[in-house]
Amino acid sequence: MTGNSEGRVVLVTGASSGFGRETAALLAERGWRVYGTSRRPSGCEESRFDLLELDVTSERSVTDCVGELLEREGRVDALVNNAGVVMGGALEETSDDEALALLQVNLLGPARVARAVLPAMRSAGRGRIVNVGSLASMVGLPFQAWYSASKAGLALFSEGLRQEVRAQGVWVSLVEPGDFATEISDHRLSVDKRLDVYAAARERAVAVMAADERSGPAPVVVARMVARALSDRRPRHCYRVGREVPWLTAAMALLPARFTEAAVRRLYRVDG
């Protein structure tokens, strides 16, 4: 899937804002036939690409969305699994239902959509799937442990799927961004249970996370990396992007775990 992308059909989930919107717009600009998705497309004003209704937590919604795309186009050349959520809260404060709600979007959602598009890709003998993960997969973040777990799961899911479908002509890649200036801070899920013992550390950590996100680079940088993963002749398993990449990868490779954990605690002011 190299060279001219004119007429290629791509489905981009979570395209009403952030990475998804920038990715869908960039791919449309480069000649792709783009279908973005949103849970409420009627509330979105978007003229650069088509928007379909999709709730990645619903098998029926996924089936209907992919079915509509195939009815319109008869093919799907690429999928960008971008839809995701973040949640702030200590593990002890987080219920099973709250954790499952996060996993339904960040891990099970991409699996549902990939499962829905794979028959068409296998039939065509080619396809690309790009899953948008996070650098949070590399280290367990305090008060975002479930988010880190979901993105670590997505990374390994992507690696396993890549090996399963490569012989069918389908390439799977992972794009892992750091902190970027998207609207994600405004939609961070919070837990219902709040324990006083965690309150001060949680508020400090989440404040640092939100400040880093709001001051990050423009999300179009991530869109360009997704486009690269879709166009590289032999796409890599993982593309990491963000200002944190150099020091984080060096720390993970060279430093003992206790030093990395201490650095994370300092960064997020967990100890005050």
Image (cartoon, rainbow, N blue to C red):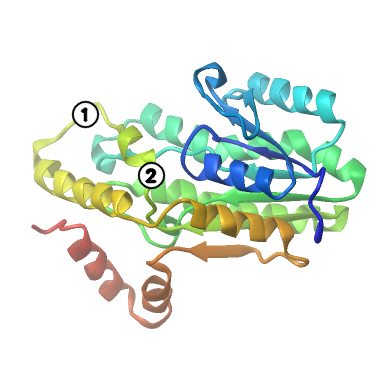
Quadrant that contains the N terminus: bottom right
Residue at (66, 59) in percent of width and height: 229
In percent of width and height, residue 109 lies at: 58, 35
Question: Image quadrant of residue 267?
Answer: bottom left
Question: Image quadrant of residue 114?
Answer: top right
Identify the amino acid type marked 2.
Trp
Residue at (15, 58) in percent of width and height: 269
Q: CA distance from mark 2 to mark 1?
A: 15 Å
Of the pair 5 and 171, the residue shown nearer to us: 5
The label shown at residue 146 is 2
Q: Which is nearer the N-term, disc 2 or disc 1?
A: 2
In percent of width and height, residue 15 lies at: 55, 35
Describe the element under mark 1 as helix, strand or loop. Answer: loop
- Residue count near mark 1 (Cα–Cα under 10 Å), binned few <14, some 14–19, many ≥20: few
Residue at (24, 26) in percent of width and height: 192
- Residue count near mark 2 (Cα–Cα under 10 Å), binned few <14, some 14–19, many ≥20: many
The label shown at residue 176 is none
Of the pair 103 and 36, the residue shown nearer to us: 36
- Residue hosting label 1: 193
Decide: is 217 above or below 68.
Answer: below
Identify the amino acid type marked 1.
Lys
In percent of width and height, residue 47 lies at: 61, 29
